[in-house]
Amino acid sequence: MATRLKDIDAVVVGMGFSGAILARELTKAGLNVVGLERGADRNVAEEFTLSRLRDELRYVVRLELMQDNSTDTITFRNAPDELALPIRRFGAFLPGEGVGGTGIHWGALHWRFLPTDFRIKSVLSEKYGAKAIPETMSIQDWPVSYDELEPFYDRFDKLCGVSGQAGNLRGTKVAGGNPFEGPRSEHYPNKPIKTGTGPAMFSAAANSLGYHAFPVPVATSSAAYVNPEGITLGRCEYCGHCNRTACESNAKASPNVNLMPVLRADPRFELRTRVFVTRLVYDKAAKRVTGVVYTDMQTGEEYEQPAGIVVLSSFVFGNTQQLLLAGIGEPYDPRTGKGVVGKNYCYQFEAGGEAFFEGREFNPFMGAPGMATAIDDFNGENFDHSGLGFFGGGYIACTNAGAPPIGGRVLPRGEPRWGAGWKQATTKWYRSNTRFNTQGSVYAHRDNFMDLDPTYKDALGRPLIRLTYNGTENDHKMSRYLVDKLESVVKAMNPTHYDLQNRPKNFTIVPYQSTHNTGGTIAGSDPKSSVVNRYLQAWDAHNLFIQGASVFPQQHGYNPTGTLGALAYWSAKAITEQYLKSPGPLVHA
Amino acid sequence: MADDSLPRRRFLLGAGLAGTAMAAGIAEPLEAQQPTASPPAAASPQEPEPFVTLTALETAFIVAAVDTLIPADELSPSGSDCGVAIFIDRQLGSAWGGGGKMYRAGPFVKGKPEQGYQLALTPREYFAAGIAAANAWARKTYGKDFDRLATADRVAALKAMEGGKAEFEHFDARAFFGQLLSITMAGFFADPIYGGNRDMIAWKMIGFPGLPATYADKIDNYRDKRYVAAPQSIADFS
């Protein structure tokens, strides 16, 4: 029997970026908030330190900061008629665990979606006719517009100390930035970080072809910066160890550095770590979640934490799983297209490759994921899709992310993988290559979804979430188009060799591709086709606010975290300024 | 040529020492024996390092394998002389080797390749099974265990596994080769605190400077110009 704890104003489940933002905004509004985190308390002074972080084996290969699959994983299959099997160790994507969540080990590429992305179904219908959208493509307009979200994008930019070059300041184009971006109310808080040799060559080649290259925006401070929370960020050191690792310079934004110190000092906030929330307590008649039940992993004791407001801010898979287990909202059924929970799972359709320049010295170990340049000419509706046979797109980038020696070496196709010939080849090419990436959108498909697995269970006896996903014909065509465009730029860079890879036909759970998972509890204007309303409030439980990329109706051609953070601030404002005054549905269906 | 008469036990005792492979009867690649191609010396530990996880047979296989994957030449000493076999021994004995952070509940079903690793075996158990299967295949194909083969046969055997031409009994040879290559490369290039990459020899080989990796003031001065620094390990800052 769970021990019932004292009632609290709000409980936050999952202390990544969204959870930390909601906890901060709610405590600022005077609420007492408990933050629950199933992983460790990742303390900056203790863990984000040198020489500890410069350990590629621990962090990059053995995945120190990632979710423990022995406790909890997901099952996966490509299609609804296949048998799903558990992901025994994560590969294709790497959700984080512990305070900070995936916001510690991300590469910190910090984008906004396009204004047209937020009304993509309407835009496609207007431009190409409603019949042009395939029946199986279950895309939806967002219930919030770019203009509404812009002030919250700006807040999140400032929290993170984002470095970049504006391309559109309040409607005026700014040279050197992304000419396709939506209007920004303010410049980026920091100037762009330094550009590497490869990305500079990419920019020159892209511009020579008439495209519009610009430095990639990144939540890595290019100089010392004090964020609106009063926290001083350091300068990026271009250590080349960013991905899958924390930052010792306090330059890369993370909940731990950019927000948690304020929360930790706030008497209205209490953090409980190594507590595993097993279920939401749902009062269906009252359309409320009365609290959450969790197991304290350090004592084995089970507790019920009653709360006035429940913020669900775990990863995409956990958010969807909690709703399905609690019976909140109708589960999605791909055969009928009815139901909403688990609907529109989307991924990021990335492809790319490398170019090799014999005799050049690129010092690839000096880098950061944001040490990149990109073109946005082939993203979303920035280009005409007439006659192309697909919708969607993505940015195309050249990146100098760092090249740690175990995983950061690449060879031209056909070179040996081992033996004396391999040693010569890896020595010859390690310092002389640069990498490319296309960040393709994934437009939702009827058959890509999540539900509960009928067989496999987690360490606490709950059914695992089951992911059914494969790349669609639309997305493969889109990706090949992007890779073709990339190839024209790479050729103009005049490399000794280059290798670009299209995506394999079937999505595969290894090797690593992208941690950009979205959907399952999507936002919309109609409870028949969405789980949460425009304020991320659950249609079926008015005191439940669901955060994170699980609310994205589909995934666009950009990294998701910028939009995730903006949505958190947008949702928090609705809670503190509307919901607290009059608890109940904020949107009437 | 390999000398079958030498007991493996003696080899095992010396396996952690640089330069003892010849004395133990392990065939060196020909190029390493050329006087003109003397390998860069890796610092030897003061004491022989004991293997704590692998059995003697397994150690012999791993040393032979890593020395074939990473042969001694003018670029570096052999894999085992760089500590890669010790690295593998320690990794298989680590939490990771014991299946840490790995979902291990059944039922176990083969599944599609797209669904990834689906065996019940921990990495430690996987390598034990793989080494046994590889040696059984080597005995069937060449008449002796893998570590007793001459260099050319070892190369041919690994190529057969890599290319999916070797058929192990009840074990996926190609997948095993993939795991073997992966852990060998991790050992060669990981920070030396884990036992491999002795004296940062692999980092020196490719020109990776190691720690501290603070380059904000260096990037602009080294555009299209090689940055060279004596590498430093985590141990140098501890």
Image (spheres, coloured by chain):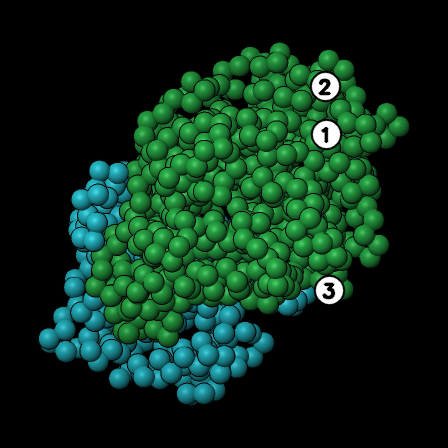
Chain that appears cyan: B
Query: Foreground: B136 or B221?
Result: B221
Q: Which residue is mark 3?
A: A82
The residue at the point 72 percent across, 29 percent down is A537
Report whether A503 appears left or right of A172. right
Q: Colour of chain A?
A: green
Query: Which numbered dot is residue A537?
Result: 1
The residue at the point 40 percent across, 67 percent down is A499
Which structural element holds mark 2? helix
Q: Quadrant of residue A440?
A: bottom right
Tell which residue pokes out farthest to the right in this image.
A285
Estimate the x, y position of residue A359 in percent, counting from the top left: 21, 63
Can residue A191 be seen in the rendering of this structure?
Answer: yes
Q: CA distance from mark 1 to mark 3?
A: 34 Å
Estimate the x, y position of residue B188 in percent, counting from the top left: 32, 60
Q: CA distance from mark 3 to mark 2?
A: 44 Å
Query: Which numbered dot is residue A451?
Result: none
Estimate the x, y position of residue A375 in percent, counting from the top left: 43, 50
Query: Foreground: B50 or A505?
Result: A505
Whether B21 is drawn above or below A304: the answer is below
Query: Foreground: A196 or B109?
Result: A196
Q: Quadrant of residue A145?
A: top right
The residue at the point 51 percent across, 65 percent down is A502
Whether A106 is drawn above or below B164: the answer is above
Query: Which numbered dot is residue A579?
Result: 2
